[in-house]
Image: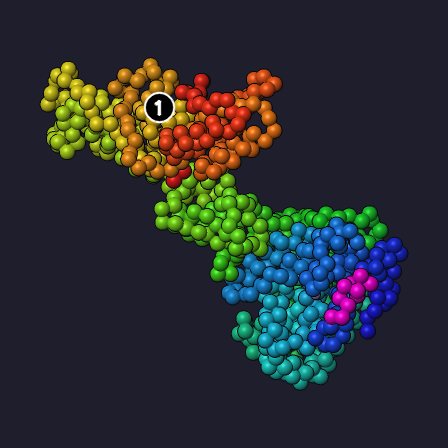
Amino acid sequence: MQNIESLAETLSVYLPPQQIDVVRRAYYYAEQAHDGQLRRSGEPYVTHPLAVACILADMRMDHQSLVAALLHDVIEDTGIGKRALAEQFTPTVAELVDGVSKLTQIEFQSKAEAQAENFQKMALAMARDIRVILVKLADRLHNMRTLGVLRPEKRRRIARETLDIYAPIANRLGMNSVRLEFEELGFAALHPMRSRRIQAAVRAARGNRKEVVDRIKHSIMERLANENQPATVLGREKHLFGIYQKMRQKRKSFAEIMDVFAVRIVVDSVDSCYRVLGMIHSMYKPVPGQFKDYIAIPKSNGYQSLHTVVIGMHGVHIEVQIRTHEMEEMANNGIAAHWLYKTVNEEPVQSSHLMARQWVKGLLDLQERAGNSLEFIEHVKIDLFPDDVYVFTPKGEILALQSGATAVDFAYAVHTDLGHHCSACRINRHLAPLSEPLQSGQTIEIITSPSAKPNPAWLNFVVTGKARSHIRHYLKHQHQAESLELGRELLDKALRSLNSSLDRLKRRQIKAFLKHSGQATLDQVMEEIGLGNRVAFLTARALLEGEREADGEVQTQSNPLVIAGTEGVMVNFARCCRPIPGDPIIGHISAGRGLVVHRHNCNNIADIRSNKQKCVELKWAEEVQGEFDVEIRVVLQNKRGIFATIANQIHAMESNIEHISSNEEDPSYSSVTLVLSVSSRVHLARIMRRIRSVTGVSKVDRPRYQRGSKREQKSPAQ
Ligand code: MN
């Protein structure tokens, strides 16, 4: 039976007394926090965190991991919060405990095998400190060891999760002993019948096998002694889950698998490994194609060893593994072995992240020497220090996205149509901005509307190439369609002013014109007009040229073009004068930017107002859609709270303040310039009246145009 003093004794081998005291304090803290709680087995709950800490102590983990292990269920199971732990212990400990709790909360239901790998990555991505994973693995290990007391249904769920998620994570981190135990316990719990049957078969074969293995071991040891090569020779038992997997995946019979015997030889140096290999190959005939040099080319989790298969007496196959003590340690404990070596060598204690990085870097070096680092980086580096976030769809599937990805990236990752029509999103069931960067573990739901369409502003925050290219593609096509539409209207209007129209154009007129203009189709010509690269009036005249020559009969009473606010990217509203529905307006064709709408009296357009080739008569539609920015100037007394009152009035009128700039003209008066969003002139007039009624406001007006500004704003938001 474990108790805190036996743990302290284990720790005394490698930790200073002050740190052991902290561990002891954490134990008593946990004991009190879980007071009255029992495990299903009937033992006090605290026996579980204690057992978890003991597992980590056997791995020689640092004292903060041990403290976190003792407290790992405190946040989840008692009323104590993260902050209290930070105060009682350290912020690092609180962070670790919180990380373990978060992992525990996520239910890794593995619906499909393809998803299992994503779950593993998500778990790794969520743990910013690698110790979180190690504590979680130890927690799971103890739960697996005590699985028997649970209801069968829960037992199966935990066993499946362990096989699908935690055993592979242990494998990625090179922690082979933990992985094997997960697999054996998981297999027994998930498939008790199959496990028992294989176990019985193994037991039946054992007596005979032991004799064979002993004989092989003996001959090898004899040979090594003759050559003065110190080494440890171990006979290896086959693991049940390993046998089961081989039977299933490689379609081998039990007898075929059991026909293979296995020994491991552990030596002092890499040199000896190769020397011993030579001896083995000279003793027994090697099976061609079975030799693997994982010392020169380590496995992606850092595993190193020489593997060979030889044919022994009576033709039995013998699998031989040859490695150094250090490789043996690494093969068993992987990343955890790193802590062991650090503390034994008494090097300064480093942050766990640094250690994990070092571990990865060590692996990288190994791989680089072997010359196949690329695949390796894919496997370990990305998984350990991920640049990805892993989020759930509402159906519980996992999507991997680049770090910094937003709901829009998510939507495009699911489906292009979902991206094109997304209008809002819920993150963990709460409405959130589309631009908010996602975090691993969140569930994302996209809200669509049939009328929603990609917004150019999205390009400012999406990070995935897929979202970016789809938005760009859409906008480009929309641009084209809209400039064509605008060009068609402008050309028709110009034709009408010349007493013709698009419908009345003759085929030969169009043909003759295209021949001269070098354009292939009339659509192209109209698109050019819409883009502002070609003047509608001149084009109209050229089209009609064959028919009429008179210049003088230009009719000025043309029908103005109608602006409804829904035109899209090819109609822009000038920022110099900020026209709003109700204002007299005039359009200016600007190259590449389509039609820019100005107020009729805007000074920026004064020079060209009467130039028919550059300007277009416009009028507002009866119903105009959207919100328009407008600028007003308020002169007010500098007194406390006056601005809040004005802002409230504006808000009450269902308008928003988009921008404020203030200009203190003298100590008692200020002039404030506000940009408001309004729907029309009438709306603006009502707002201005309300502001005027505020005590302390002496003047409200709307400037005719903003000096020096020639920029346009995009169409209003729909
Ligand atoms: Mn636990």
Residue 220 showing in the rendered view? no
Q: 670 or 28: which is nearer to us?
A: 670
- Whether residue 428 is visible, yes or no, is yes
User: Is residue 176 shown above or below 635?
Assistant: below
Spot occupied by residue 324 in the image (x, y as percentages of width and height):
75, 60
Image-based side of 497 in relation to 338, left or right: left
Q: Where is residue 602 in the image (x, y as percent from the top left)?
A: 37, 19
Residue at which label 1 appears: 599
Tell me the quarter of the image containing the C terminus: top left
Residue 469 painted magenta: no
Q: Residue furthest bottom?
A: 204
Q: Is residue 553 left or right of residue 594?
A: left
Q: Where is residue 399 in the image (x, y as percent from the top left)?
A: 51, 54
Q: Which amino acid does label 1 sit on?
A: Arg
Q: Where is residue 15 in the image (x, y as percent from the top left)?
A: 85, 56
For the point 54% across and 65% down, the residue is 110
Q: In which quadrant of the rendered image does the N terminus lie?
A: bottom right
At x 61%, y 78%, the residue is: 152
Task: Please tell me whether residue 670 is drawn above or below residue 677 in the rendered image.
Answer: above
Q: In this view, does 58 lie above or below 620?
A: below
Q: Give the range drawn in magenta.
A: 27-37
Please tell me how crowded label 1 is: few (under 14), some (14-19), or many (20+) other residues with Cα within 10 Å. many
Quadrant of the image where one finds ligand 1: bottom right
Classify residue 245 by image quadrant: bottom right
